[in-house]
Image (tube, coloured by chain):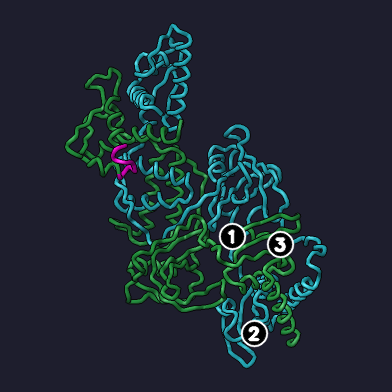
Chain colours: A green, B cyan
Amino acid sequence: MTATAGERLGRLLNLVPYLLARPGILVADAAADLGVSERQLREDLELLWVCGLPGYGPGDLIDMAFDGDRVTVTYDAGIDRPLRLTHEEALALIVALRMLAQVPGGADLPGGTGSSREAVERALAKIESAAGDAAAGLPVAVRLPGSAGAERVAQLQAAVQHRHALRMTYYTATRDELTERVVDPMRVLLVGGHAYLEAWCRRAEAVRMFRVDRIDECTELDEPANPPADVRPSDVRDTVFTPSPELPLVTLRVGRWARWITEYYPCEQVVEESPDRWLVSLRASDLAWARRLVLGLGTEVTVVDPPDLLEAVQREAREALSAYGRRV
Amino acid sequence: MSRSRTERLVNLVICLLATRRYLTAAQIAATVPGYEHDTSDPREHEAFQRKFERDKAELRDLGVPLETGTTSVFDSEPGYRIARRDYALPDVRLEPDETAAVGIAARLWQHAGMAAAASSGLLKLRAAGVDVDVSATLGVEPLVTADPAFEPLQSAARVRQEVRFDYRTPEDDVAHSRRLQPWGVVSWRGRWYVVGWDLDRQATRSFRMSRVVGRVTPVGAPGAFTPPDDLDLFGHVSKWSTPVEHPNRATVLLRPGRAAGVRRRGESVVPGPDGDRVELRYSDPDSFARWLVGYGADVVVLEPDEVRKAIVARLRDVVESLSEPADGDSPAPRQIAGAESAAGVRG
């Protein structure tokens, strides 16, 4: 029993009510809507044609009329409704709608009369009620990061909608610098507890992901956003920051109370040498960033590689200490 | 699945939906094409029974509600039927903006299994006559992820079944087996947690799902416990990360043009001959010092003394540890306050 075989039975039971609700639909449109090839859909229809009520005579079998490329179900043999939602289906739709209901601001949805949040909440209530038992007592609660930054998110979202360029002051944490840049906004994402603006950066001439809480100032320009035509949103899966293998590799020996960095930063490798010594390798986009990280972690880490980093940490610590010495 | 099997299953569903009486296996065999066999031949009969069991399992997997029972007290053998009200998705009427919302929601999942469940749910809504607009966008879209432990934990919470799993925080040397009555799961600041009654600790605990190692094993029967009436899932997760007050003030001296990360948090910046004086607010001197010390000589704390001392101590430790041989004995692990809380949540 393969997964696709089980899918086929489910698809067939769904297909009859789907067509029943859309008399005379183009076979090609139905196939596209249901996510199957036109050929597969025709095979499904052929199979359904020989199924029906006991007796299995001409008046008992599922019947349909073809008119060129269009199809109409003329007899449904009693499968006129789709199956109820399963727990998993109800869970997937309801949790995602609950997340959506938490999104700050929100553009107007097509055909909407109220705010998008109202529409999401109305949809949520209807899906919960249709799911019935499958949604009863769903023990899942969701909350997106708080309202901090909500105004900024709303401003960015407006710029995306208006297709306007933005001028902004952005803090690049890895280089510890503030830069002013003009960007062509593409979309706003909420990933892993942070909001991001994905935009074409005219300064870097590349698509960049900007963390919203690091956008210190921002003005929507009158100028249309004009990202290059061939630019696509990046594939973010579950992490926004995918370290590039070209970046320098930093290897640290990490004590127990700094092991949290292995959860916080994407690491190339973690080797547990002993309970008190983990060898952690991560990509640093900037050596100065790695120096700040290491100094901040203090004696819980030592630098294994590269030697320049070790030297930079030593130099910086001595220099800082002498700066305090001068100012006792 | 062969065409004949699919055909048989579709016919079985239609037959059981149409019947009001419970039909016995023998009656079904005599009715639905594909089950024909010689009932007097034990081998054939056994083959039929196996086939019928597989088919029933297939229907249940798909969520078809097979009902078992007898129509009259004289029936010696239970039969089967499908109640239409349990089978059919109730009427769903969505306004255009609501269908747009559902279309957006269904594509937010980044987890393959949940994404598949969302699309098959969407297909059922389509079959119910809802025309889902898949091109709509909100302008802001949350991407919804899930850890491997998400599905089994929420499922156990739903049916109130105990679970056992191995759990490891970065501070633990090994994973520890935990037994939990899961009350519910929570997404908080982009991470999933399970909240419940920890049977080993005899206390309410929350666990970060990304720290669950390996499989979640259900233990015992469903319905084994009742979550508290006044359950506040967020309360249990967010109490570790309430908004931090910053009641204390510090003055730091920044090298001109340096330490942008400190500068942007400053309340005022006053340039002077020896650097820029910046006022900052902070809460805990030690974590404040940990942040500032990263900036090295670009930042010198002028006051208060508690922060100066914390930074100088850290710098001395670093300078001293660097002059030790790299492979010398490590200092004994420091016991830090609240280490146990790491078993729950750490922001």
Front label number (3 vs 2) = 3
* Residue B20 shows in the view: yes
Is A38 covered by the magenta stretch? yes
Three-letter amino acid code at disc 1? Pro
The residue to which callout 1 is attached is A266
Magenta stretch, residue numbers: A32-40
Q: State if disc 2 and disc 3 touch (CB < 8 Å).
A: no
User: Rounded to the nearest whole Å, what is the CA distance between mark 2 and mark 1?
Assistant: 33 Å
Give the spatial CA distance, label 3 vs label 2. 31 Å
Q: Which secondary structure class fits the magenta region best?
A: helix
Q: Compared to B35, does B120 lie above or below?
A: below
- Give me the residue at 56% from left, 74% from top: A175
What percent of the width, then of the height, locates residue B56?
A: 44, 24
Q: Is residue A122 visible?
A: no
**Does residue A36 appear to the left or right of B144 in the view shown?**
left
Secondary structure category for the residue under label 3: strand
Task: Name the chain letter of the residue that bears numbered label 1.
Answer: A
Above or below B305: residue B242: above
Q: Which residue is mark 3?
A: A254
Q: Which residue: 63% across, 70% down?
A: A290
Residue holding disc 2: B253
